């Protein structure tokens, strides 16, 4: 199965962002015929403060009902091309709160997964820039998984990548490939992005599928930069596809035989379970 990670440079113009996403997905489908395409985190709007996010937000419909512009665009692309479309994340209008929410549509246009980002990015970056995602969004608490072409996928978003326990749990729940759509900051991404994705691939023996935003955007009058370098890592930790700078995409072949070979040669899950005696003793 071929998977394309789409790299965007979205801002706070939702219509322009939808057009950019559509153009890149169509180009990737035309060139590489992927079975799944994945968009970055909040691909419909990045920056512009709370007002811009609220304006871009969509109330998610009941299954089968009509959704907003981004929802219907994703559904239409999946159905038109007969592929799985992983919509990175859009901004969900949850009524009182907004959520940073992944939508996934199967090849027939059916919504197959919905995931609200669990870990919220409230940090101070090395350059002193403060981020408080919890001031913008509520956090999720439900896991989301789906199957595509016989491969078991799990949904995560961006900052989640720093919490190995979530990824270990997803591996125990049968994940073979984990999606990590992101807006990694330039400040943290230059040092941590590839290391974190390769580490999660190595310790869960899953494919890491990480579509990311690239470039600068405006946040309450200040310019901010996101790192890009969208990539796919295999279950051994090799980076098997990666974007350069700018917008575009990268495509990798997800081969279940690689997953099986890595896991057979180094049965981490079984060894972890066999050696759990220390957990009780240590009160871990
Ligand atoms: O702002 C929005 O609308 C969407 N949310 C994001 O883009 C969030 C909060 S700014 N970004 C991250 O989580 C970056 C994580 C990161 O860079 C790291 O873990 O180092």
Image (cartoon, rainbow, N blue to C red):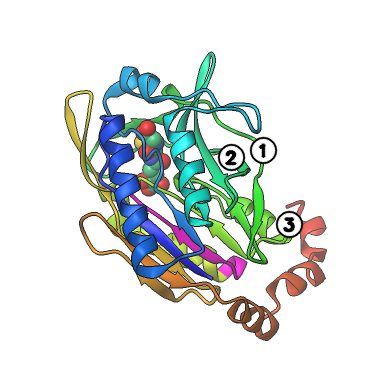
Q: CA distance from mark 3 to mark 1?
A: 13 Å
Do residues under tags 3 and 1 come within 8 Å of each other at their CB atoms?
no
Q: Residue at x 42, y 62 (%)?
A: 4
Q: Position of residue 36 (x, y in %)?
A: 50, 59
Q: CA distance from mark 2 to mark 1?
A: 7 Å
Tell me the residue that label 2 is attached to. 115
Q: Secondary structure at mark 1?
A: loop
Report whether the residue tagged 2 is closer than 8 Å to ligand 1: no
The disc at residue 142 is 1
Q: Which residues are magenta?
A: 203-213
Left or right side of 27 for 35: right
Asked if residue 263 is positioned above or below residue 162 in the image, the reply reads below
Q: Position of residue 94 (x, y in %)?
A: 55, 21
Query: Where's ligand 1: which quadrant?
Result: top left
Q: Position of residue 138 (x, y in %)?
A: 52, 26
Which numbered disc, 3 or 2, marks the residue closer to the eye?
A: 2
**Dot 3: few (<14), some (14–19), or many (≥20) neighbours within 10 Å?**
few
Q: Secondary structure at mark 2?
A: strand
The reply to whether residue 123 is visible in this rendering is no
The disc at residue 119 is none
Q: For residue 209: magenta?
A: yes
Residues 185 and 216: in front is 216
N-terminal of the pair, mark 3 or mark 2, is: 2
Do residues under tags 2 and 1 come within 8 Å of each other at their CB atoms?
yes
């Amino acid at each position: 199965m071929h998977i394309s990670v789409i790299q965007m440079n979205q801002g706070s113009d939702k219509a322009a962002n939808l057009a950019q996403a559509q153009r890149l997905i169509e180009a990737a489908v035309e060139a590489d015929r992927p079975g799944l395409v994945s968009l970055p985190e909040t691909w419909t709007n990045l920056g512009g403060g709370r007002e811009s996010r609220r304006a871009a937000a969509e109330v998610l419909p009941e299954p089968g009902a009509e959704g907003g512009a981004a929802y219907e665009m994703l559904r239409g692309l999946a159905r038109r091309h007969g592929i799985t479309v992983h919509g990175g994340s859009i901004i969900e209008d949850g009524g009182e709160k907004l959520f940073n929410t992944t939508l996934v549509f199967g090849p027939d246009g059916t919504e197959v997964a919905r995931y609200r980002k669990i870990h919220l990015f409230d940090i101070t970056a090395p350059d002193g820039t403060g981020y408080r995602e919890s001031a913008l969004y509520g956090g999720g608490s439900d896991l989301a998984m789906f199957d595509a072409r016989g491969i078991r996928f799990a949904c995560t978003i961006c900052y989640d990548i720093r919490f190995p326990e979530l990824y270990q749990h997803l591996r125990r729940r049968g994940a073979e490939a984990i999606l990590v759509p992101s807006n990694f900051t330039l400040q943290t991404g230059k040092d941590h992005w590839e290391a974190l994705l390769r580490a999660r691939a190595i310790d869960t023996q899953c494919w890491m599928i990480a579509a990311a935003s690239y470039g600068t955007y405006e946040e309450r009058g200040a310019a901010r930069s996101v790192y890009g370098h969208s990539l796919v890592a295999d279950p051994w930790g090799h980076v098997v596809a990666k974007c350069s700078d700018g917008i575009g995409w990268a495509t990798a072949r997800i081969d279940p035989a690689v997953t099986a070979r890595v896991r057979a040669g180094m049965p981490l899950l079984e060894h972890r379970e066999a050696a759990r005696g220390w957990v009780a003793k240590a009160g871990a």
